[in-house]
Amino acid sequence: MKVLFVLKDLKMCERLGIMYLSAVAKQAGHQTDLIATDLEDIHKKMKEYQPDILAYSLHTGEHPQIITFNNNLKKRYNFLSIFGGPHPTFFPEMIDSNGVDVIVIGEGEEAFVDLLNALQKKESINNIKNLWIKQADGSVIKNPPRPLLQNLDELPLPDRELIYNYDKSLFDEGEKRIISGRGCPFMCTYCFNKQMVDIYGKDWSKVRKRSVDNIIEEVLMIKEKYPLEFIKFNDDTFIMADIKWLQELAEKWPKKIGIPWFCNVRANLVTPEVARLLKKGGCVSTFLAIESGNDEVRNGILKRYMSKDQIRNACKYLREEGIKYGFYNILGLPVENKFEVDMETLLFNIELKPTMAWSSLLTPYPRTWLGEYAKQHGYFDGDYDMIRANNKIESAITFKNKKEKRLVENLHKFFGITVSYPWLLPLTKQLIKLPQNKLFMYILMGWYGYTLKMRMSPIKVTPKRFLRWILAVRKHVNDY
Ligand code: B12
Ligand code: SF4
């Protein structure tokens, strides 16, 4: 079968989901290719490649545009459309949209191969687990999920050629993304994890780590074939394995690889021992999520269950080992006094002196506990089609009045730079009263790009890369 993966955009970011799917498809003898709708003319590709299947990977917010895109193609070409990724997983009702033939819920590798093999052999696809299949009369067959893959080492390594053949700039970037495991035992209310537990039960909560040797095999392959200066682990929380796994990584990585790396950590899991092992293994920078500087909001509403002192200690242990740390935060939460809470978050970030601070405007994603809470309390109207693919300009939350909306949305633009230079605070407080404008977006994206690439990452800044980053910032801003 000839598969064409379709992404709304690539945005200088390797998408591991489709890279795994492409690897398993090729292993089973099928052909794959890729298109990003912002980079290439689809009609040229359809005529040249003549795919049997268009396979879309979707985040919430990308869906309205992609559904229209697919539906227009359906009028001109003959193919099967299949949709996977976070949006179909959390909002399978999207199958009712015109032109959507099949959706995949949850982990996709085995279901995708079963589908391709069945189509190849001209067999029925109606009993394949994880799939919802639209029938000719419009009814939908809804199959249950299969058990989760237990041994991730059995998967082939993600297909990097799929991405790099398509976008040479990603090949040339010194940083490459990999993932060391799947699953998370926590239940933060804004996160996709809760829905995965609803789908898979407690099995999803058990973290499935790849073996250290399997990870090393992947990185050695990357090192041999592509420019590599820095590895970024995509894992939600990298250090969730038992300590023996981290000890083994810390032992083997410097000897066999010796490339610096980044990972996400959870403050309550960072002990002096964990920080020491991260350092020994070659970790140079981390991100941890504060989300809110207000204890009641962080623990009562977001259910992070961690104290300020735990966060302070985690930072201290990382600092003592010389590991950089950045923060994730969420602004515009569904609470009565949004702006006051966001100011508390800003001040707590300033206190902890991170290398960079990132903030997002809350997006009430479908089926998250917080999304439902926002709906029930009148902070969100429940229209997921109004959620933007990128929540960097405007919040989807309902505010008390225009003034509150403006203050929160503008604070988001100045958040990172104010955390780095707290003496800007009086100026920030004045600027956020102004109407939102493109310059504020440039400040947000420019500062984010600068701190991410030049402070958190050790990769070489070549003129070519620098120019590419500038263009990426411009593209991000112009997209809004
Ligand atoms: C690392 C990460 C990032 C990184 C890297 C992005 C990347 N695309 O790799 C960064 C920081 C850049 C990022 C950015 C964003 N992210 Co992010 N990110 C993640 C994270 C933690 C890991 C992604 C990953 O590598 N997963 C591992 C792969 C193997 O799994 P997967 O992608 O889900 O794919 C599997 C299945 O979904 C399925 N599948 C996927 N696509 C398809 C397609 C077909 C045809 C089939 C059959 C199956 C299938 O099969 C795959 C293999 O099993 C996830 C959470 C998570 N643990 O997955 C959030 C997550 C995907 N991100 C999320 C969001 C919201 C974003 C942003 C929109 C945030 C923002 N506002 O800017 C941006 C979007 C950027 C973009 N265009 O990709 C949400 C999506 C929620 C939703 N309902 O859409 C998630 C789920 C986290 C959350 N908040 O709950 N992200
Ligand atoms: S936010 Fe992180 S720690 Fe919380 S449930 Fe999601 S993945 Fe787990």
Image: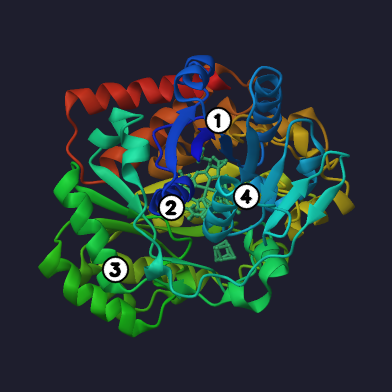
Whichever of labels 1 and 3 marks the residue nearer the N terminus, that label is: 1
| Nearer to me, 87 or 35 | 35
> Residue 278: where, in percent of width, then height?
27, 70
Mark 2 residue type: Tyr
Task: Give the alpha-carbon distance from disc 2 to disc 3, as whole Å.
Answer: 15 Å
Residue at the location (60% across, 52% down)?
A: 118
Task: Give the alpha-carbon distance from disc 1 to disc 3, as whole Å.
Answer: 31 Å
Mark 4 residue type: Pro
Which marked residue is nearer to the observer: mark 4 or mark 3? 3
| Nearer to me, 136 or 203 | 136
Give the labeled residue for mark 1. Answer: 8
Mark 1 residue type: Lys
Crowding at mark 2 (Cα within 10 Å: few <14, some 14-19, many 20+): some
Give the labeled residue for mark 3. Answer: 214
Task: Give the alpha-carbon distance from disc 2 to disc 4, as whole Å.
Answer: 15 Å
Q: Is residue 306 above or below residue 446?
A: below
Residue at the location (25% across, 26% down)?
A: 466
Give the labeled residue for mark 4. Answer: 86
> Residue 54: where, in percent of width, then height?
58, 34
